[in-house]
Amino acid sequence: MAKIKEAVFDAGPIIHLSEINKQNCFSLFKQIFITKEVSDEINFLKTEINKSRNIILEKLNGKHKDITKIIIEKHELDLGEASSIALCKQKSIKFFFTDDLEARVFAKKYGLNVHGTIAILLRCFREKILSKQETIKTLNSLKIDSSLFITSDLIEWTIKEVKKFKEK
């Protein structure tokens, strides 16, 4: 495995990783694209995000602004998620990172490869950006110190999987 060449993020994973001080996980990606709408949502994180040189603000063209509006109206997604899905289509990027369940379901139907904050942490573990102990600590912190709605069962299952993983 290696760095992910390019991905589109909505605000959720950026916010959640920042809340638990794991901005180093952004190094897993060569380029992270966000829309102006997502940038506006994470405005309070601007100084931290500006340190991440691989987070790139990308404007939607007219056609994809229209797609954003259609997604919002017909599928009742928020502006950030809808604009991010439209950006994936505009740039032909398959990887979309969101923690919003409705956005995940819709994006999968749209043919995108969708993941969330937990997947980022697990990939960082496999890529040795995070140690096994740090990953477990971070997963527990995610449940307590972030605004991510996540069940204890999912955290416990994920920690069990990390513990079972044989490092090479």
Image (cartoon, grey):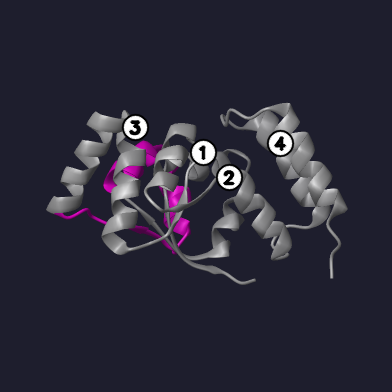
Pointer 1 with pointer 2, Cβ within 8 A = yes
Mark 1 burial class by Cα count in 10 Å: few <14, some 14-19, many 20+? many
Q: Earlier along the polypeptide chain: callout 2 or callout 4? A: 2
Query: Given the image, on which type of amino acid does mark 3 rest?
Result: Leu
* Residue at horizontal 25 percent and vertical 31 percent from the top: 74
Residue 13 relative to residue 82: left or right? right
Q: Earlier along the polypeptide chain: callout 3 or callout 2? A: 3
| Quadrant occupied by the N terminus | bottom right
Label 2 vs label 4: CA separation? Answer: 12 Å
Label 1 vs label 3: CA separation? Answer: 13 Å
Label 4 vs label 1: CA separation? Answer: 16 Å
Query: Given the image, on which type of amino acid does mark 2 rest?
Result: Thr
Q: Which residues are magenta?
A: 36-61
- Which one is in front, 65 or 104? 104
Q: Earlier along the polypeptide chain: callout 4 or callout 1? A: 1
Pointer 2 with pointer 4, Cβ within 8 A = no
Q: Which residue is mark 1?
A: 99
Label 4 vs label 3: CA separation? Answer: 28 Å
Residue 136 relative to residue 64: left or right? right
> Tag on residue 117?
2
Q: Earlier along the polypeptide chain: callout 4 or callout 3? A: 3
Please, is residue 43 above or below residue 127 in the view?
A: above
- Which one is in front, 8 or 94? 94
Q: Which residue is mark 4?
A: 141
Q: Which residue is mark 3?
A: 77
* Residue at horizontal 23 percent and vertical 30 percent from the top: 73
